[in-house]
Image (tube, rainbow, N blue to C red):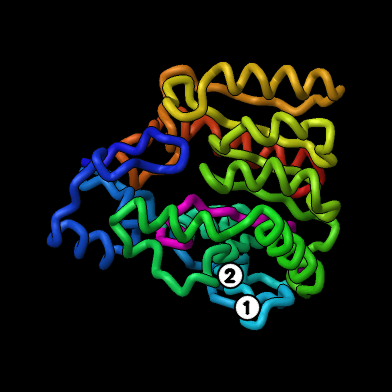
Amino acid sequence: MLNLTRPDGSRPEDFHVTRRTAAGMLFAGYAVAAFSAEAAPITTSSDGLVTEWTTIPNGAAKALPAFVARPAVSGRHPAILVVNEVFGIHEWIKDICRRLAQAGYVAVAPDFFYRSGVDLPAKSDLKEILAVVSQASDDQVDGDVRATTAWIRKQPFARPAAIGITGFCWGGQVVWRSAMIDPEIKAGVARYGQLKKVSLRAAELKAPVLGFYGGKDQGITQEDVAAMRGALKAAGRKDEIIVYPDAQHGFLADYRASYDEPAAKDAWPKLLAFMKAHGVG
């Protein structure tokens, strides 16, 4: 069993992956470095959906790849940008996109680490993974986010004034930052994203954000959460942070050992309600 409790995944000493186990994980399409052999990942049907890879112009020599899941029915739908963990676009991120699409959204998951050319879901060495992740600067990622919302606004199946963002772990911090730098984003839901850096910039938030955090997260402490709440209050913000006292880091990821089913089931409808309450629904 792999147990990821750190803010950006585990360290090498936290787990050991055999060749046989790694091969099974890779075949299933999940991130090798995070999959628990005891997990029972949720699989969402693609019936009634269009699922595809596309490329998004972002000013780079090679355009930004993105996985898209959306309702097959005609018309314009609200959109949610889905930001992955450090493991890139693997089967769980695709399933999150399908879940959102089944709820009526256009879900777009950009591959923020594509420039490296590394197949991150296939990697079991966290040092190698984090070396790739570290190459994606805040400015680069922010640019890719803005490119994605610009692309969404031009699509005939998306409502241009109804764009939200959600993200996990590494992607959770991207959510907070995106709500500061992209005026096209109307609402954000951050799942256990690091807070130390963004709490210093709370006054820059332009869109409302809902945060989900675990009380037993060893990498994002309750002191961090309290500091963010204080920064939001000082900035006159009404953003909300929900803490599940018994949950660890990664508690929403049903392919990990850290999955907390009661917390995950409570958080999902709250995400949908928050998006709708802020015009993304």
Instruction: Give me the residue at 66% from left, 35% from top.
Output: 197
Question: Residue 243 got which mark?
Answer: none
Left or right of 156? Residue 2 is left
Which quadrant holds residue 258?
Answer: top left
- Whole-Å distance between the Cαs marked 2 and 1? 6 Å
| Residue holding disc 2 | 66
* Secondary element at image label 1: strand
> Residue at the location (37% across, 62% down)?
121
The answer to whether residue 77 is magenta is yes
The percent position of residue 120, horizontal first and vertical second, equals 40, 63
Give residue 119's quadrant in the image. bottom left
Corner quadrant of residue 146:
bottom right
Badge 1 crowding class, 10 Å Cα cut-off, few under 14, some 14 to 19, many 20 or more, is some
Is 34 positioned to the left or the right of 277 in the image? Answer: left
Left or right of 172 on screen, residue 125: left
What amino acid type is highlighted by mark number 2?
Ala
Q: Amino acid at mark 1?
A: Thr
Residue 267 on image: x %, y %: 55, 33
- Image coordinates of residue 181 in percent, x first then y, are 80, 50
Please give the range of residues in magenta. 75-91
Image quadrant in which the N terminus is located: top left
User: Which mark is drawn over residue 55?
Assistant: 1
Q: How many marks?
A: 2
Q: Nearer the viewer, residue 42 or 75?
A: 42
Identify the residue at image location x=34%, y=47%.
Answer: 255
Horizontal and vertical percent position of residue 263: 46, 28
Residue 249 sits inside the magenta stretch: no
Residue at 19 percent across and 52 percent down: it is 17
When the figure is inspected, residue 213 is found, relative to residue 174, above or below; the finding is above
